[in-house]
Amino acid sequence: MKKQKKGMALIFFTIFVFLCCSPCLFGQQMTVKDLLDMPPTPADHRIAYGNNPNQFGQLRLPKKEGLFPVVIIIHGGCWLSQYDLHHISPLATEITKMGYATWSLEYRRVGNKGGGWPGTFLDVAAGADHLNKLAQEFPLDLDLVAAIGHSAGGHLALWLVARHKLTAESTLYKQNPLPIRGVVSLAGVGDLGSPNLQEICGGVIQKLMGGTPADVPERYAQGSPQELLPFGVPQTLIQGAKDQIVTEGSVRDYFETVKKSGDKVDLILLPEAGHFELVIPTSFAWPVVRKAIETLIHSPVINKLAQSRQESRNL
């Protein structure tokens, strides 16, 4: 009987500790410090895709034999130089454990020489296209490539799947970009011109683009994903309802615009999440993110696109 009471006491104590240590249950969202305090996880390979110190990626491969679908991962951090790819490495490691190769990109950011317009965009594009070279050495299935990004990285992931819409007159144009079959945007910015986002991170969007939408409309037309709709590939948007950085309203507005364009899009709203839970694998949000990635990569739409590319290549 005493042992039973001790066991029950231990259970109640464990529950009590969990409740006290679970910030979301009391309305306290995870912070950027929680994200940056996670120890980075090692990659299998660090590979340069350009000559600048910030032009490299981290490649991780599943610990098994096979030809692996690839997930391009783009970190956030307000497009600013003080935030690098290390904080998203635990997420990359978890996605790799799911059986996918991951290619986590670093790129020049605002504050780096050559960062902002157009360097940030050109770097992400070059990093993605570098998979064509990597596939000659590593077992990568380039018919099944998806992208995922958080916050500013969500914007860049959305832009990556949209850039095939650019014309030859665009500063950001590149012929035959790597086809990306779908995208998961975690609290991402789909509309750079949204009035609700012009003040985020100290007005960083204007620093990224070199002016406001009124100042340089041609840049926003090339660099804002919303201006390039429809993409022709599925999008999954995951958003925390308590996000104070990228607001639910701005993501809902983008979602509605995507629907009107005819693209397939899903919006997953997490009522208790803020901005950072979405990329912390130990948070309650991770199972939702994991399922969204699996659903996207194995969706009939993506498989049909991959099959179409294989058939055209065999002609």
Image (cartoon, helix red, strand yellow):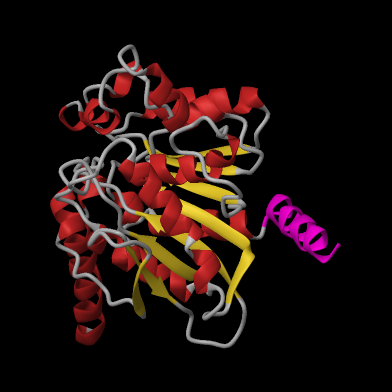
Vertical placement of 213 versus 87: above or below? Answer: above
**Left or right of 130 on screen, residue 80:** left
Instruction: Give the vertical position of 66 relative to 254 (above or below).
Output: below
Question: What residue appears at the point 56 percent right and 34 percent down from the top-left corner?
Answer: 168
Can you give x and y, in whole percent of width and height, for residue 310 in the image? 77, 63
Residue at 34% over, 17% down: 213
Quarter in which the C terminus is drawn: bottom right
Query: Looking at the picture, does residue 228 appear above or below residue 193?
Result: below
Q: Which residue lies furthest to the front in this view?
A: 169
**170 in the magenta segment:** no
Is residue 273 at least partly visible in the picture?
no
Q: Main secondary structure of the magenta part?
A: helix
Query: Is residue 88 in sight in this rendering?
Result: yes
* Residue 303 inside the magenta-drawn segment: yes
Percent across and percent down for residue 120 are 32, 44
Q: Is residue 16 left or right of residue 196?
A: left
Q: From this viewpoint, which residue is outermost toward the top?
A: 214
Q: Is 281 or 168 nearer to us in this picture?
A: 168
Q: Quadrant of residue 19?
A: bottom left
Quadrant the N terminus occupies: bottom left
Residue 230: name its quadrant.
top right
Residue shown at 49%/45% (left/top)? Answer: 160
Instruction: Give the image location of residue 238, x and y in percent.
Output: 45, 43
Q: Give the range drawn in magenta.
A: 299-315
Q: In which quarter of the image is residue 84?
A: bottom left
Is 312 on the left-hand or right-hand side of 290?
A: right
Disc count in the image? 0
Task: Where is residue 138? Give x, y as percent.
Answer: 52, 80
Q: Residue furthest right?
A: 315
